[in-house]
Image: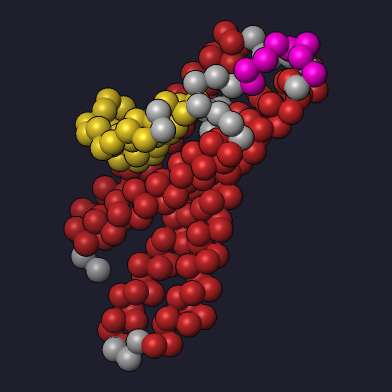
């Protein structure tokens, strides 16, 4: 596989696993009763507005290495409301759903492809091509799932930690404290992504 073909395959996998990931957040968020105003594939400024459904704007952003949803109001009740903990547990479910969707999709694809569909292919070269693409999707899904469960804000794992602290304290965390921790975590992740992309580009050009 040449460098350009590998790049295209990697970008397709990134976009696909991000779509699955954000769809997990979106579906569980809707089931939990949240109002979701934005569903984005990619990060940064909006590039394309696809459509609007049930009050949610579905868009594509310029940087295709992530995604996000915007929930309008987390835990829409006061700290002393009896339903406070129930709403925070719903937060936990929404945050965990993205990575869980990646794990489930990878397992389902592996079962369908390696357990059945692969055996129907007769062309050895075609089997090799599909093996690589399926392996890449499974690998990308599992990496995204595991990384997002790390307890580092703004990753899902970090937000789950915030929610669990709120459950224990029975009150929302100070917004300024959360924003500062998310900012620090975002800088760490950004530096890591720059290093990873530099390594990937080096591999494509000189590897």
| Residue 181 falls left or right of residue 18 | right
Could you say where residue 152 lies in the image, as x and y percent from the top left?
58, 31
Residue closest to the eye, 158 or 110 = 110
Which residue is painted at 59% across and 21% down in the image?
A: 74
Which residue lies most toward the bottom here? Answer: 122
| Magenta span includes 5 | no
Residues in magenta, as a range? 75-82
Who is closer to the viewer here, 66 or 40?
40
Q: Give the overall secondary structure of the magenta segment.
A: loop
Which quarter of the figure is the N terminus placed in? bottom left
Residue name at image x 80 percent, y 18 percent: 82
* Model colouring: secondary structure
Quarter of the image for residue 95 reads top right
Say whether residue 40 is visible.
no
| Left or right of residue 40, residue 22 in this image | right
15 with respect to 91 (left or right): left
Name the residue at 61% across, 35% down: 32
Quarter assignment of residue 53? top left
């Amino acid at each position: 596989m040449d460098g350009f073909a590998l790049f295209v395959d990697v970008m397709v996998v990134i976009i696909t696993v991000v779509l699955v990931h954000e769809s997990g957040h979106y579906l569980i968020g809707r089931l939990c009763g949240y109002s979701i105003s934005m569903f984005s594939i990619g990060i940064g400024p909006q590039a394309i507005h696809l459509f609007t459904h049930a009050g949610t704007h579905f868009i594509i952003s310029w940087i295709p290495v992530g995604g996000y949803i915007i929930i309008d109001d987390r835990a829409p009740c006061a700290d002393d409301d009896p339903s406070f903990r129930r709403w925070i547990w719903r937060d936990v479910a929404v945050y965990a759903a993205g990575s869980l969707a990646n794990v489930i999709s990878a397992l389902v694809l592996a079962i369908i492809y390696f357990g059945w569909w692969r055996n129907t292919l007769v062309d050895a070269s075609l089997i090799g091509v599909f093996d690589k693409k399926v392996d890449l999707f499974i690998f990308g899904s599992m990496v995204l799932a595991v990384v997002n469960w790390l307890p580092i804000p703004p990753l899902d794992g970090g937000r789950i930690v915030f929610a669990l602290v709120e459950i224990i304290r029975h009150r929302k965390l100070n917004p300024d404290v959360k924003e500062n921790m998310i900012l620090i975590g975002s800088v760490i992740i950004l530096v890591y992504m720059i290093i990873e992309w530099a390594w990937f580009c080096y591999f494509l050009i000189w590897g």
